[in-house]
């Protein structure tokens, strides 16, 4: 009697925790409803979860004394059906067709075949055992699904794809349902939750290991170049405006570098060969100005200017 009381208590707790797990994708589907788009989300987890709930509810109907399994999986079937229906309503055409094929093949075809075979070819305890092992196999597949998420977390070093709350509730659900199966002496309920507990703990350990690490971003050099780019353009524009000519700039590790600009002065007046130029200093022989260079004929050292004489 005490064993049944504890089993009932764990079953009630299992229903509550399982409800939280079923409702965990609710924010995602609220965003889908608000944006009228699935945003690349896949429907496979929800279709497979719906298939698992259908099988466990069928198992609970066949096995006597498993009413708490009927309630939790019945609620799961309703919630997952709503998720799949919303996905079919807002997904693009290709994803909608793929999801419809999965539902017809898995939730209608395969489930119908299992139900037909177990009803026609097995009876009594044998039917319960056949259904139990089928449920164990499906549950192991569902619990092994987070392996892809674990691989993604290790590769990206980011826990953004693996919420801690979901992993925590999965571990808690596995512990409670394992205790329920152990107290009810139902190996088909207890066995898959051992694997669920292991994968849940692994997810929580990964979360603790990578929670403080950020995903790899762009290199600091590229970021620094991106920050210095407006300043560099501003300097080049300023030089071009001051010199009155096009400026040429180059980015180096030390910062922006501006090359000197050749400023071309207007050419001096042409001097004709043999002409006498009299400025009153050469005595009228025309040689004083030729021997003494004019100021505009002097080549400055800081400019590369060629002056033709």
Image (cartoon, rainbow, N blue to C red):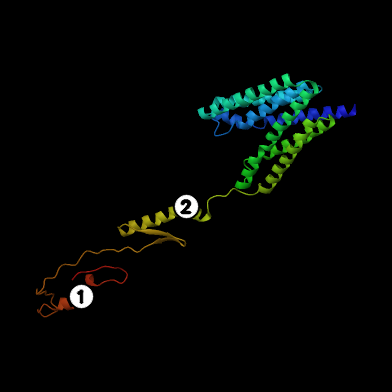
Answer whether labels 1 and 2 touch (C-beta < 8 Å).
Answer: no
Whole-number angstrom distance, CA of label 1 to CA of label 2: 51 Å
Q: Is residue 225 above or below residue 293?
A: above
Label 2, secondary structure: give it: helix
Question: Where, quadrant-wise, is the C terminus in this rendering?
Answer: bottom left
Q: Residue at x 64, y 40 (%)?
A: 149
Residue 160 in the image: x percent, y percent?
62, 42
Q: Is residue 210 above or below residue 9?
A: below
Viewer-closest of 167 and 136: 136
Viewer-closest of 243 and 10: 10
Task: Return the residue found at the far top.
Answer: 120
Viewer-closest of 83 and 269: 83
Q: Nearer the viewer, mark 1 or mark 2?
A: 2
Q: Residue at x 78, y 36 (%)?
A: 175
Residue 128 in the image: x percent, y percent?
77, 24
Tag 2 residue? 226
Residue 287 lies left or right of residue 249; in this view the side is left
| Residue 157 visible somewhere in the drawing | no
Residue 127 lies left or right of residue 295; in this view the side is right
Viewer-closest of 278 and 171: 171
Label 1, secondary structure: give it: loop
Residue 47 in the image: x percent, y percent?
63, 28
Residue 57 lies left or right of residue 161; in this view the side is right
Mark identifier at residue 236: none
Ranked by sequence position, the earlier of labels 1 and 2 is: 2
Question: Where, quadrant-wise, is the N terminus in this rendering?
Answer: top right
Residue 89 in the image: x percent, y percent?
55, 24
For residue 114, what is the image quadrant?
Answer: top right
Task: Return the residue found at the far right.
Answer: 1
| Residue 51 visible somewhere in the drawing | yes
Mark identifier at residue 293: 1
């Amino acid at each position: 009697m005490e064993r049944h009381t504890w089993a009932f208590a764990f079953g009630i707790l299992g229903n509550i925790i399982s409800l939280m797990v079923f409702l965990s994708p609710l924010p995602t589907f609220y965003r889908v409803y608000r944006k009228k788009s699935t945003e690349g989300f896949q429907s496979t987890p929800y279709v497979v979860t719906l298939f698992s709930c259908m099988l466990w509810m069928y198992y609970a109907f066949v096995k006597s004394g498993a009413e708490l399994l009927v309630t939790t999986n019945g609620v799961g079937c309703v919630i997952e059906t709503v998720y799949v229906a919303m996905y079919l309503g807002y997904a693009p055409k290709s994803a909608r067709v793929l999801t419809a094929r999965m539902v017809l093949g898995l939730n209608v075809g395969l489930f119908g075949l299992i139900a037909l075979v177990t009803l026609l070819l097995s009876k009594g305890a044998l039917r319960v055992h056949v259904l139990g092992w089928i449920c164990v196999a499906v549950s192991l597949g569902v619990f092994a699904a987070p392996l892809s998420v674990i691989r993604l977390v290790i590769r990206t070093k980011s826990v953004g794809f693996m919420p801690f709350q979901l992993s925590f509730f999965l571990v808690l659900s596995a512990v409670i349902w394992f205790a329920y199966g152990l107290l009810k002496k139902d190996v088909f309920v207890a066995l898959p939750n051992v694997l669920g507990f292991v994968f849940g703990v692994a997810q929580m350990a990964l979360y603790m290991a990578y929670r403080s690490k950020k995903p790899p971003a762009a290199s600091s050099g590229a970021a620094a170049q991106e920050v210095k780019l407006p300043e560099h353009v501003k300097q080049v524009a300023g030089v071009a405006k001051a010199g009155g000519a096009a400026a040429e700039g180059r980015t180096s590790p030390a910062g922006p570098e501006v090359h000197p600009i050749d400023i071309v002065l207007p050419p001096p007046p042409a001097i004709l060969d043999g002409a006498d130029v009299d400025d009153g200093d050469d005595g009228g022989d025309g040689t004083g100005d030729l021997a003494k260079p004019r100021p505009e004929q002097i080549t400055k050292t800081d400019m590369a200017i060629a002056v033709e004489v």
